[in-house]
Image (spheres, grey):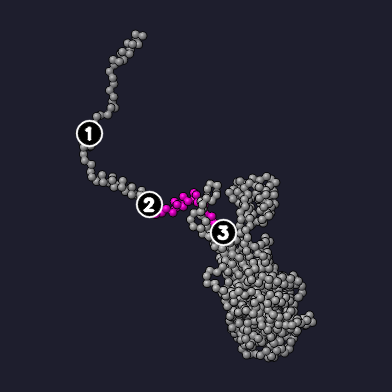
Amino acid sequence: MSRVGDLIRKLRRLPRRQNATAMPTVRYATSPLLASRTPPWRVKFLIGAIGLGFAVLIGRAAWIQIIHNDFYLQQGASRYERRIELPANRGRILDRNGELLASSVPSPSLWVIPKDFDATPTQFKALAKLLDMKQSELKKRLDGNQNFAWLRRQVDESVAQQVAALDIKGVHEIKESKRQYPEGEAAAHIVGFTNIEDEGQEGIELAYQKQLVGRDGVRHVIKDRLGRVVESVGDLIPADDGREIRLSIDAKIQFYAYQRIRDAVAFHKAKAGSVVVLDAQTGEVLALANVPSYTPADRRNLTGAQLRNRALTDTFEPGSTMKPFIISWALETKRVKPDTIISTGNGRMTIDGATITDSHPHGDLTVEQVIQKSSNIGTAKLALQFQPKEMWELFTSVGLGQKPQIGFPGVVTGRLRPYKSWRRIEQVTMSYGYGLSASLLQLAQAYTVFARDGELIPISLLKRDGSDETATPKNLALRTDYKPGLNASNNNDVVPIRGARVFSPEVTREVRKMLAMVTANGGTAPKAQAMGYSVGGKTGTAHKQEGKGYSGNKYRSWFVGIAPISNPRIVVAVMVDEPGNGVYFGGDVAAPVFSQVVEQTLNRLGVMPDLNVRPDITAMQSVEESF
């Protein structure tokens, strides 16, 4: 114990070590560095730098919060504000009397969140069956985007209810707008249809897409975390619904015309057929029907042949329907009179090495009989008296070689070659309808010159209405002299639309008598006669073109006429393509359709009959036309 104590005492007696790193004492009063004066510019620089920094911060704050705050306000609003679109209703399409041709109705559409989808094998099988798809196809849809996938859009209400009854997790329903077409296939080629996005694809739906579609509205709201609307913010922009389109079509006339051409195509085993009905006073298209047709609401098996609006898009050589125009111009230019004799000889005539023929030798014919018997040779002899330019201007003046201005997609121009390239034989063949082409609508419009005492009138697929349309109208129509407020029965109050003068009234009255002879005993179309109404018109029959020549056993048959012949109110044009039961003359194939359509249309328009009884046409003899 004493040793430990001694050791401690020795240690205490050892000298303490000096700290080598101790800081030297600074005398501030005598330091040359601290004693010197700070330069004034340094102080100013520091103050200026600090002030500039504050100015930059203030400017940036003003830029963000006052001047350019849109982005940040938008970002803030996006955290709590939602934009709800208010869809506009697509405009309706109506006939001339207000009957619905196309309208929109709510339709359920089914969608799914694939990542939330949970169904038993039984539910999965039932769902695929209700959606009318294979299970493999349904599985493929579920394997795509995991956040959203359409199952089936615009399904029937019953299907939506059955899907809802399955109670499958992840499957949802929303309401969309679906187009309905009450007239179905009868008016399909006029009205057209929309796609799944409610965009016009054909017909009036396409032609007036901008007017029909309208403009969606917007509503801004605040929603809570559960998606419930708490309050509205900002201004409400209401939806602007699409405008109504009122067509010139009469739904009942349209349906009847479609039925008659459909039956004729079936009876004659034809490839196709078309019919056009024009109001000869107003130029309105009362009916335009084609066969084959389609159902706009069900286009799953739609073919190109069904889709074609043949009356507007198909052109053909018009055949003998051109002969009245040649006769009219010969009368107009005083080259002949109705009773002028024209020798057709033995029914054969050679021009520049080419031979044209009549169906039968007619010998001497008056100008009237040239039309009645449909003589190629008689027409050719008159055409050779014209200069090519003169004949070209005649055809142009009745609308041939020009596109009808009706604002409809797919309307064709037809073909009328420049007169400088015509040879004599070509001028002759064009006089009876070979070597040029036109659509059925063009042909119907051309015949308005005979119905309107020599005036070619403009035609329209929109109802012509003289009501005040200076403000933004809800109903789209053309403004003309047509009196407002008229219905189909007020026939006597119709105000004719003005046209372009082609022939004199005296000449067209003479030609109307000739057209009436065509439908009488000894003419080519007694089957065109209508119960209680006088009619007149011209048959046409032509070989169809195949390659560089003409088919020997394929024909087009048509009849274009006016009624009543005493005071024309309508023009009706009928075309049947490739009749296949051995009968192909226009007087046998197309004329009966004309007769039936005329009776129904004039009765619908309230036109009083101008004949007491109908002649017994079964006992009449028809003449085979030359073509």
Quarter of the image with the C terminus in it: bottom right
Question: Which callout, 2 or 1, points at the residue further toward the start of the chain?
Answer: 1
Q: Amino acid at mark 2?
A: Ala
**Magenta highlight on residue 69:** yes
**Dominant secondary-structure state across the stretch colored magenta:** helix
Give the numbered dot on residue 28: 1
Label 3, label 1: how many angstroms apart (C-alpha)?
Answer: 83 Å
Label 1, residues with CA under 10 Å away: few <14, some 14-19, many ≥20: few
Question: Which callout, 3 or 1, points at the residue further toward the start of the chain?
Answer: 1
Residue 293 at what x, y percent from top left? 68, 67
Residue 149 at what x, y percent from top left? 60, 51
Q: Amino acid at mark 3?
A: Pro
C-beta proximity under 8 Å, tags 3 and 1: no
Query: Can residue 257 be seen by looking at this rendering?
Result: yes
Q: Magenta segment range?
A: 59-86
Residues 231 and 212: in front is 231
Tell me: 241 left or right of 602. Answer: left
Residue 315 at what x, y percent from top left? 64, 74
Residue farthest toward the top in the current orientation of the protein: 2
The residue tagged 2 is 62
C-beta proximity under 8 Å, tags 2 and 3: no
